[in-house]
Amino acid sequence: MIRRHYKTVRNGISELDKTLLNFPTPGPVNNNPLDKKDHTAIQLVTGYSGFGVHTLLSVLTTFPNTYKNIIFVSVAAIDSGSFKGAEEVNALEQSVNNGLEKYVELARKLGFAADCRMTTGTDVVESAVNLCMEIAAEYPKSTVFTGQITFRLEKFYHKLLHNETAFAIQRHLQWHGLTTVILPIRMRV
């Protein structure tokens, strides 16, 4: 039952990838630097995927004409149980950075000033919170955004099987006074 559920979720995420990773972008590329006085959306992402693109598009459609800057944030999470050395960390950081650059390119093609930041750590929540707080200190008109899978019919086992990282980050950041919005990514499971 658990395997079937995860397979269904993976298929749903694959559909997001097919739909959202190669859509045409309308306008000219914005290569302007970020302005610290402008409203800034800080978007937490993992690898470049339809999930992250869906979250970005949700930010832009839910809050039209609000944000001028977008900063993509990711944590290169080191699994201390399977850590194999510095070369593995370098490869992980390069992979994360490549994904972040794709998000920046997309946001610029959509007309926004964009940048990315990355940190490396063993605790995703702590690392993400610290990085978001640093960015918010630099860009005081910031709001943090992340996505969370939402199911049409919530089952008792969904919280057991799916990561609650977005909610943990939200609790920490809101405690520090930084507005954090979790946008739903609907799954028809």
Image (spheres, rainbow, N blue to C red):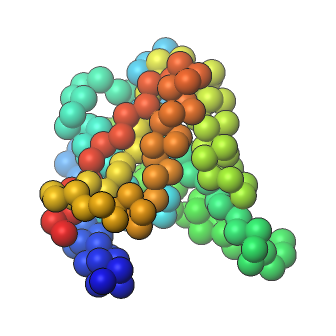
Q: Residue at x 41, y 38 (%)?
A: 145
Left or right relative to 130: residue 22: left
117 relative to 82, above or below? above
Residue 171 in the image: state x and y as whole percent.
51, 33
Residue 69 in the image: state x and y as whole percent.
43, 31
Q: Residue at x 35, y 80 (%)?
A: 2
135 and 153: which one is in front? Answer: 153
Count of marks placed on residues: 0
Where is the N terminus found, in terms of image quarters? Answer: bottom left
Q: Quadrant of residue 137?
A: top right
Residue 94 visible here: yes
Residue 24 in the image: state x and y as whole percent.
21, 59
Q: Residue at x 74, y 78 (%)?
A: 82
Residue 92 in the image: state x and y as whole percent.
66, 69
Q: Quadrant of residue 10?
A: bottom left
4 relative to 142, above or below? below
Where is the C terminus found, in terms of image quarters? Answer: bottom left
Left or right relative to 6: residue 71: right
Residue 131 visible here: no
82 relative to 134, above or below? below
Outermost residue to the front:
156
Left or right relative to 161: residue 138: right
Left or right relative to 114: residue 183: left
Q: Residue at x 53, y 19 (%)?
A: 177
